[in-house]
Amino acid sequence: MKKTENLTVTVIAKQSNGAGNMLLTLAGAGTDRLPSFTPGAHIDVVIPGCGKRQYSLCSERADRQRYQICVRLDQLSTGGSRWLHQQLKVGDRLLISAPRNHFPLPDAPRTLLFAGGIGLTPLLLMAETLAERRAEFTLHLYLKRGDELAFAGRLAQLGERVVIHYSQEGDSLRRQVPAELTHPHHSVLVSCGPAGFTDHLHQLAAHYGWQAGQLHSERFSPVPTTQSVAGDRFEVEIASSGARYAIGADQSIADVLEAAGISIELSCGQGMCGACITGVLSGRPDHRDEVLSQQERAANDCIVLCCSRAHSPLLVLDL
């Protein structure tokens, strides 16, 4: 997988968008149009001293001159959100990636959207797209309190198809189950939010008969793994050259290939963004990512190089 070129954008607006959230508007250089994107897409933002961070696009798709991202100030921030909130200024330039989408809006007769806090960001454009299609959907938004509400104007335009729940008023997912969640027939459940929120939602869905193929989610952070990699040595072969490389128990495929001078597109390094998805021509991957769908995992024809490993002694990569 070849590295993609970064895009240079200018910050043309920076404004509060609900308690703790900052809405950033980014414009392309000159009259150049920015690449198009679909609901659920995200971009990488290169933050000085921190590296790349991923943020969902929430701007209207028809606006090809601007991107918008909404950044929550994370109290456990490793520097990325803090820098964007406290140091970035209007007029500054940023390097970003072109949009990529591994959380697309699925097609179904009925769509239930469940957002936990700033998890609303990728789901808002999905809801607006469904409204344009006059499709059947409901957006459930879970917040702690009223001052956290972001995108109030756009949510108001969606009308009664948006249901807002405030945990401080006793209306949390753990205390009240929306009636729609008890009827999984001909539906998909799309969610984004903290790990605890998503895990509990999926547990409820399983209780009411939802199948794995009906569940689509994006998490803020990867699921902690308890899998041991001790003795998990295997090899990868580069199909274009036939070169083989040993992957040790404490090494990722991406690390080994980059050390060998093979160009790999990397971003999050945690199996969440999909930047390093690569085709597999032979062998059986041990999928440990948060990106691939159940169907993609079952096909065994691609792998996320930064975190996944192999069940077979050899993987032949389409590189």
Image (cartoon, rainbow, N blue to C red):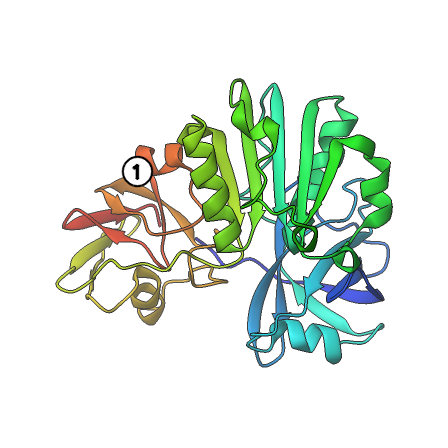
Quarter of the image for residue 296 reads: top left
Q: Position of residue 7 (x, y in %)?
A: 68, 61
One can see residue 132 in this view: yes
Residue at (83% x, 49% y) in the render? 152
Q: Residues within 10 Å of mark 1 (few under 14, many from 20)?
A: some
Looking at the image, residue 199 lies above or below residue 82: above
Q: Which residue is more in the foreground, 207 or 250?
A: 207
Residue on which the image places disc 1: 300
Residue at (72% x, 59% y) in the render? 70
Looking at the image, residue 121 lies above or below residue 214: below
Residue at (35% x, 50% y) in the render? 319
Quarter of the image for residue 84 reads: bottom right
In the picture, measured across the screen, residue 103 lies left or right of residue 316, that is right
Quarter of the image for residue 173 reads: top right
Q: Position of residue 317 (x, y in %)?
A: 30, 48
Q: Which residue is more in the foreground, 85 or 318?
A: 85
One can see residue 36 in this view: no
In the picture, measured across the screen, residue 164 lies left or right of residue 56, that is right
Looking at the image, residue 300 lies above or below residue 238: above
In the picture, measured across the screen, residue 271 lies left or right of residue 226, that is right
